[in-house]
């Protein structure tokens, strides 16, 4: 039997939808990551060579990865879903 208190908070569909669309640039600046602006509103992160960020979307062609703000926190930063949501909604 699992302990319900270990699961973390429940997030509403609206909160999850908003988190997916959250702008990544302020979130990454808050984490202290260096960002270099490129053409057309794209940004690159020297800490993650080849990774491109724009608005709430990112792609990493060399690793065949892409996604929204939640995906970035989970797949690039290695956070759990709940930690990703906490970071984005903080």
Image (tube, rainbow, N blue to C red):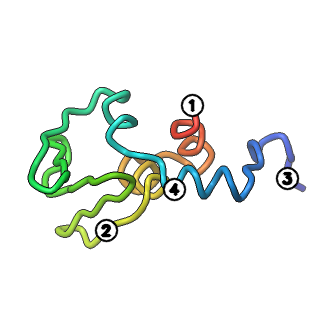
Question: Of callouts 2 and 1, which one flags the residue occurring earlier in the amino acid sequence?
Answer: 2
Q: Give the SS element for disc 2.
A: strand
Question: Of callouts 1 and 3, which one flags the residue occurring earlier in the amino acid sequence?
Answer: 3
Q: Give the SS element for disc 4.
A: helix
Nearer the camera: disc 1 or disc 3: 1
Q: CA distance from mark 2 to mark 1?
A: 25 Å
- Asked where in the image residue 68 lies, by quadrant, the reply is bottom left
Residue found 23% across the figure and 63% down from its top: 60
Question: Of callouts 4 and 2, which one flags the residue occurring earlier in the amino acid sequence?
Answer: 4
Q: Which residue is mark 1?
A: 90
Residue found 39% across the figure and 53% down from its top: 56
Q: Which residue is mark 3?
A: 2
Residue 37 coordinates in the image, percent (x, y): 13, 43
Residue sitting at the far bottom: 64
Q: CA distance from mark 3 to mark 4?
A: 28 Å
Residue 65: which numbered mark, if any? 2
Q: CA distance from mark 1 to mark 4?
A: 14 Å
Q: CA distance from mark 1 to mark 3?
A: 27 Å
Q: Are marks 1 and 3 in contact (CB under 8 Å)?
A: no
Q: Nearer the viewer, residue 36 or 66?
A: 36
Image side of residue 9 versus residue 76, left or right: right
Question: Of callouts 1 and 4, which one flags the residue occurring earlier in the amino acid sequence?
Answer: 4
Image side of residue 75 versus residue 86, left or right: left
Using a 10 Å C-alpha cutoff, classify the residue at mark 1 as few (fewer than 14 neighbours), some (14 to 19) or many (20 or more).
few
Residue found 19% across the figure and 51% down from its top: 41
């Amino acid at each position: 039997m699992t302990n319900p208190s270990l699961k973390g908070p429940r997030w509403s569909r609206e909160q999850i939808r908003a988190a997916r669309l959250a702008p990544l640039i302020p979130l990454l600046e808050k984490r202290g990551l260096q960002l270099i602006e490129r053409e057309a509103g794209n940004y690159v992160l020297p800490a993650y060579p080849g990774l491109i960020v724009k608005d709430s979307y990112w792609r990493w062609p060399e690793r065949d990865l892409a996604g929204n703000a939640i995906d970035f926190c989970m797949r690039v930063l290695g956070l759990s879903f709940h930690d990703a949501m906490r970071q984005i909604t903080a």
